[in-house]
Image: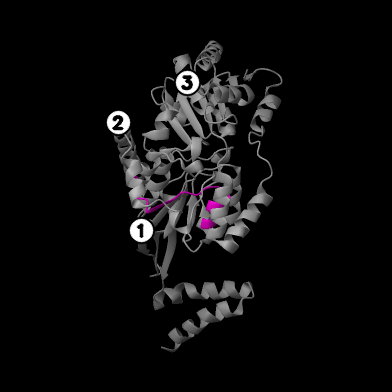
Amino acid sequence: MPQFLTTSDAGFDAAFSALLGMKREDSPDVDAVVAGIIADVRDRGDAAVIELTARFDRLELTPETLAFSAAEIAAEVAKVGPEDRAALELAAARIRAYHSRQMPEDASWTDESGATLGWRWTPVSAAGLYVPGGLASYPSSVLMNAIPAKVAGVERLVIACPTPGGVVNPLVLLAAQLAGVDTVYRIGGAQAIAALAHGTATIAPVDKITGPGNAFVAAAKRRVFGKVGIDMIAGPSEILVIADGTADPDWIALDLLSQAEHDESAQSILVTPDAALARAVAAAVDKRLETLERRAIAGASWRDFGAVIVTRDLTEAAALSNRVAPEHLELCVADPEALSQQITHAGAIFLGQWTPEAIGDYVGGPNHVLPTARSARFSSGLSVMDFLKRTTLARMTPEALAAIGPAAERLAISESLEAHGLSVRARLDRLNRS
């Protein structure tokens, strides 16, 4: 049974604060283990990766078989049926079209002093994408990570995807092929992150690592940050639905369960000013849980972390949503565009009851790699920008230096940085002599 809260109740503020503070990740302290794995890979390279893969994934590899061969990929891709291929191709095309619009433009201008200023965007040279394997092997995540990188112009794109027991999802390899991935390594865990960051004799290091993973992967990404860039540290999935009396209770129930079925630690929250709708949705969730294939997982998530909140009105609902800063926000109300103007913190917003969050996971176009655990307050979902760097440009003419150089010299002196000031003064003196 999820929590039922009403904003007009005396104890609501305390109960809502407790909801916000719930610890949903029941992960052991893996940092010490991960530190040892990273050090081992850094010191012994391929040998360490191969040993750890045999231990954790029950897969015996050699340096020559760390990556899938072109023939192996072709054989697996051939297993994909035409309907699955068509769906994946549609998703790839829509994701590519959306992310192509995100590409920023270079800029250059000359200001009133005569200085030419601007910036230039360039991609990282190499990116490594982590794709979970086994039961949590999602070809959609390949597309969402790889396509923005290719649109940005990343020259070398590789994937690390564990294949426990040698089992591989052909759709993952097809997604990699459609997205333009160069190499797919069949390794995972902290050892894969370490190999991508530090490199081995066989695996060349990358500049940025993106993609979700378990607690060991997350800890490894934290540890290698600085050596390489990372996208984010993603936690369990979450959805918040704001709905009014126009919403279909069964549709809302399914949307809540679409996140609950990901993970027992996922969180699904309904916020509505309609108490009757709140009861109807809760009943619909219970009904759907009777037959849902992943009902054990979804039921545990809904029971332990789910919540139904009845508010005074939609404005209060929006305010509560902003405090949650959810990964996914559905606005299943009569006028979703108007309500969306009150939303300041959300990873992704889905407007209207005909826009289920599941569309965003696959074929909508926007990225489904989104900030969790309230980090939408200060961060954004994965985009082309994650694979680009902005380099600023500046050029002084003699006249521009004469106009603004004395101020730079004055500030350098005030900071007791003599060489700074002298580097400007030497040029100003040359100008004064000419």
Res. 221 in view: no
Q: Amino acid at mark 3?
A: Leu
Give yes or no for residue 379 being in the magenta stretch.
Answer: no
In the depicted view, which residue is nearer to us: 299 or 169? 169
Residue 286 at x, y = what percent?
A: 55, 14
Q: Which residue ends up furthest to the bottom in the rendered image?
A: 433
The mark closer to the camera, 2 or 3, is: 2
What residue is rendered at 56% in x and 77% in y?
A: 420
- Which residue is depicted at the point 68% across and 22% down? 12
What whole-number distance in Å separates the C-alpha atoms at marks 1 and 2? 41 Å
Secondary-structure class at tag 2: helix
Lower sequence index among marks 3 and 1: 1
Label of residue 305 in the image = none
Membership of 181 in magenta stretch: yes
Q: Earlier in the sequence, mark 1 or mark 2?
A: 2
The front one of 318 and 22 is 22
The disc label shown at residue 83, or none: 2
Decide which of tag 2 and tag 3 comes sooner along the chain. 2
Residue 254's tag is 3
Direction from residue 434 to residue 132 in the image, left or right: right
Residue type (three-letter) at the residue carrying disc 1: Asp
Query: Looking at the figure, which quarter contains the N terminus?
Result: top right
Secondary element at tag 1: loop
**Residue contact at pointers 1 and 2, CB within 8 angstroms:** no
Of discs 3 and 1, which sits in the foreground? 3
Location of residue 186 in the rendering, given as x and y in whole percent from the top left corner: 46, 49
* Image mark count: 3
The residue segment tinted magenta is 177-195
Secondary structure under badge 3?
helix
